[in-house]
Image (cartoon, rainbow, N blue to C red):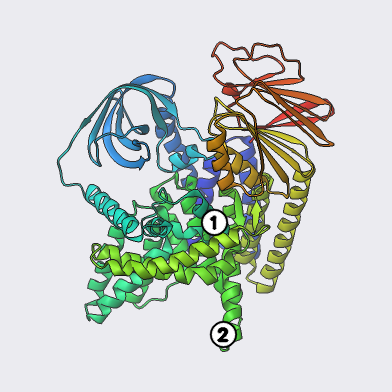
Amino acid sequence: MKRKVILAAAAYVSGLFFASFFYDINGVIIALSAAVLVAALAKLKGFKAVDYLIISVFFIMAVTVNRSYTHFVYDKIAAYSGTDGSFCGEITDYTMYDGNFASYTIKGKINNEQKARISLFTTALDADYGDIVTIEKCTFSTVEGDYLFDSAEWNKSRHIFLEAEKISGISVEKRNMSHIRRSLSRFRNKMSERILIEMTDETGSVLAGMIFGEKRHINDQTRTALYKAGIGHILAVSGLHVSTLGAIVMAVLKRLRLNKYLCFAAVNIVLILFTALAEYPVSAIRAVFMLDMLYSAELFGEQNDSLNSICLAALIICICDCYVLYSSSFILSFCGTYGAAVFAPYMTENIRRETIRGKVMYTIASAVFVSLAVTPASMYYFDETSIISPLSNILLLPLCTASMLCGMAFVVTGGIFSFLLIPARLFLTAVIGISHALSSVPFLTIPRIDELIPAIFIISAGAVAVTYLFSGNKKTVSNILLIVVLLSASVNIILSQSSVNRTSIAVLGDKTSAAVVISCGRERLIVDMGGSNEEYVEKYLVTHGGNYNDHLLLTERIEAKYVSYGQNFDNLRIYSVNGGNDEFDFSTNKFKAEYSDGILEITVENCVIAFHPAKAEDDISADLCVVYGNVPKSADMERDCLIIRDNGNNFEILPLNGKYRIRSL
């Protein structure tokens, strides 16, 4: 039975994957190639006819469900993109931001005919969960991601396919009713505020993030440090929280000598309330499923199997939600759980733990194998991945767990025992300090220089997984793992070196301003020509890594930007000009950059590229002109002119021998 569940889950998840991301002829070819490979391996493994039947049925079922939902739901809703209309619905989720702004998820009807969920970003409304929002007129548009964040994929995982823009006539109908989620939201906000007030410094925002998954109060430097140190996962409500809370509740109830069935029911009630308090993250839902299977096995005297539990949880979640594969939380959660519950125990089972040395070796090896299991997904979703995470998790995770337990006890008691936050603050002060120290050390992270790197890591992980599932020989798995680690590391080093030697000009920022990053050899010049481009520049520098001599030219809002760049970037040599009236020249033996009157001209590889604002009236002679600023909609696209409004920024110009090509970022 266990084998059947594993096959069904693997087939169903694979079907959703191919249906979600490959729907053209290339996808069909890839799917058929994968099917041939699986059939060949299954033949070697001695699969029976019933096994092939299970794989086929669940794969076809997943593809059918996904494509049917896409056709009958997603496509019908997305068809309203670009149209004007009205919307009326109930608030199902919202997030408050600084400056009296808020983002709302509203479930209702478009033009009183098409059921849909939409996203609405506006000034904060006097509204709560369950209240009815009516928009008399708005323009619907599909949710699109940008260089900073793939909001389209994230919203797809939440079944939000449209957002409302150009709103006129909005009203709120208050519904004075008992709403569980509203009560939980108020309690969560109250406890978060108490933690922030009681702890006064950055430790409070980190603790609130650990307990509720609430990250918006954490400053960028601390959040970056935690992720660079490899312990950023503590900010997501996941298996660590659920298993810890479940174990404590079960231990207390057993102490009270309650009936085992009552204990099981009580633990489930507590975990469901906690998951609701954290706003139903899929990682917590997965953990609740798995913990239920563990306790159910104990309840009925059965042996729990970790791989079987993971597969059954994945199968249930995927059947309930055919778009769940768009969720990074789902992927990262299952990769981490697989690494901790299946892969690491399998690879370390021969390590003897009778001595202190053996225990240390086992702990380190387990942490390494868990990190290896998560690395491919981390490379895909994050700009950089920590290679120090095994060590940092061994050192810092106990402190994080202790502080989380103190915080949970504070929340459960309604904030009565504020002294519980004292040890939490001490533990988190150490965690944050060590994380900042680790994050400042060069070469402890792997940057995602090119989209090829995540693909290589994912293919490598697939090779190891297939070997593990179909070989069963630990020596073979170890050899394949060693080969793919060395291969992935070698490719990463080669691409890193290639990136340093490559000449590129990156155009970054929003659609009305631009920051330009010229990289050539070991020299890199950043020219910020207005707008709020710091986050775009930071992402580009992080993902491209390398040991560069960085220079920054500021042309507008110099004082504010000087502080912002100084806080986020180390070893920057910063220059400035007085609002475009001054001139600036920067030359190396490979490129030359000149700035004057708002116009930046770059000469590199026998190619002249000019950047100028839309208001510039002078004729500019260059091989390529890039126009930024408030470009009129009537502006024409000329052969050698790029208008940032249409390109949306965030692309690279790769010049070579008097020619150039454009590559989207």
Q: Which residue occupies 49% across, 45% down?
A: 326
Which of the two marks, 2 or 1, is nearer to us in this view? 1
Q: How far apart are marks 2 and 1 (CA)?
A: 33 Å
Q: Which residue is drawn at 66% across and 20% down?
A: 597
Q: Can residue 416 be seen in this view?
A: yes
The part of the image, by quadrant, that contains residue 79 is top left
Residues at marks 2 and 1 touching, judged by CB atoms closer than 8 Å: no
Image coords of residue 412 (percent x, y): 26, 64
**Could you tell me residue 650's position as x and y percent?**
61, 33
The one nearer the camera, 12 or 489, is 489
Mark 1: amino acid: Ala
Amino acid carrying label 2: it is Arg
**Rendered-image quadrant of the N terminus:** bottom left
- Mark earlier in primary sequence (2, 1): 1
**Res 225 label:** 1
Question: As displayed, is residue 543 above or below residue 553?
Answer: below
Badge 2 is on which residue? 353
Which secondary structure lies at badge 2? loop
